[in-house]
Amino acid sequence: MFRKLAVRAVTRAEKLAALYNEYESNPKLKRLREGATQLVRGMGQPRDPWILFVGEAPGKEEDLQGQPFVGRSGKILNNMLASINLDRKRDVFVTNIVKYRPPNNRDPMPSEKEASISCLLREIEIISPEVICPLGKHALESLFPNERITSAHGVPLYFEGKTFFPMFHPAVMLYDPGKTKEIERDFQKLGELLDKMSETIE
Ligand code: URA
């Protein structure tokens, strides 16, 4: 007699939960973890996100709430998404390379980014978005060490069958408002790229 085994596919949410548990026990991130309130997991459209945005590391508000991009940069990101008819909850997934807040909002250290990159690559694999947008130099250079955000922003990069669209970090608008127009233009270009991609998919 054969006994029927109820084999259930592991869901994307379960895979992500296992990945974040692994990240939480990474000994190379012990110091960073001890200085933070909590792990800030990636968040967003759970089933089939079009786009993945990758930031640098959580700030104060993100550390308190345990969610990425919920502070001032997050408000800018949400407004920019709305300007191209994208909704944070419906269409996108948002994460950071480093998932604990560095003390006093300092830049993440190279060793912290190195210890975190495999988690980001796994997130990309699990989420499998159409487009990946590294936000700012830390995200871009962790994925493409030879690229610089000043020249790479707003230009699609095609790598291993995936489309990357580097953009300035939204916080740039706060400390360098002169870049606002350029950032708005890049979001418009992203919208055009997505329109073109959806035409070819249909
Ligand atoms: N800046 C980031 O890079 N990530 C966040 O989650 C918030 C601010």
Image (cartoon, helix red, strand yellow):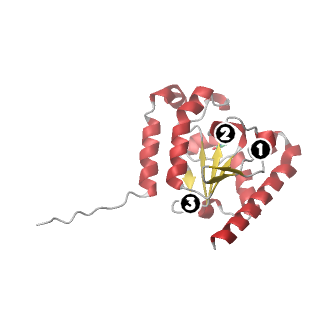
Left or right: 23 as drawn, with respect to 196? left
Upstream in the sequence, badge 1 or badge 2? 2
Ligand 1 shown in quarter: top right
Which label number is shown at residue 45? 3
Report the disc number at residue 144: 2
**Is there a contact, CB below 8 Å, between mark 2 and mark 3?**
no
| Distance in Å between CA atoms under marks 1 and 2 | 10 Å
Three-letter code, disc 3: Gln
56 and 119: which one is in front?
A: 119
Q: Earlier in the sequence, mark 2 or mark 3?
A: 3
Callout 2 amino acid? Phe
The x, y position of residue 67, in whole percent, is: 57, 47
Q: Which residue is mark 1?
A: 152
Q: Is residue 67 above or below residue 130?
A: above
In which quadrant of the rendered image does the C terminus lie? Answer: bottom right
Please tell me how crowded label 3 is: few (under 14), some (14-19), or many (20+) other residues with Cα within 10 Å: some
Q: Name the element at disc 1.
A: helix
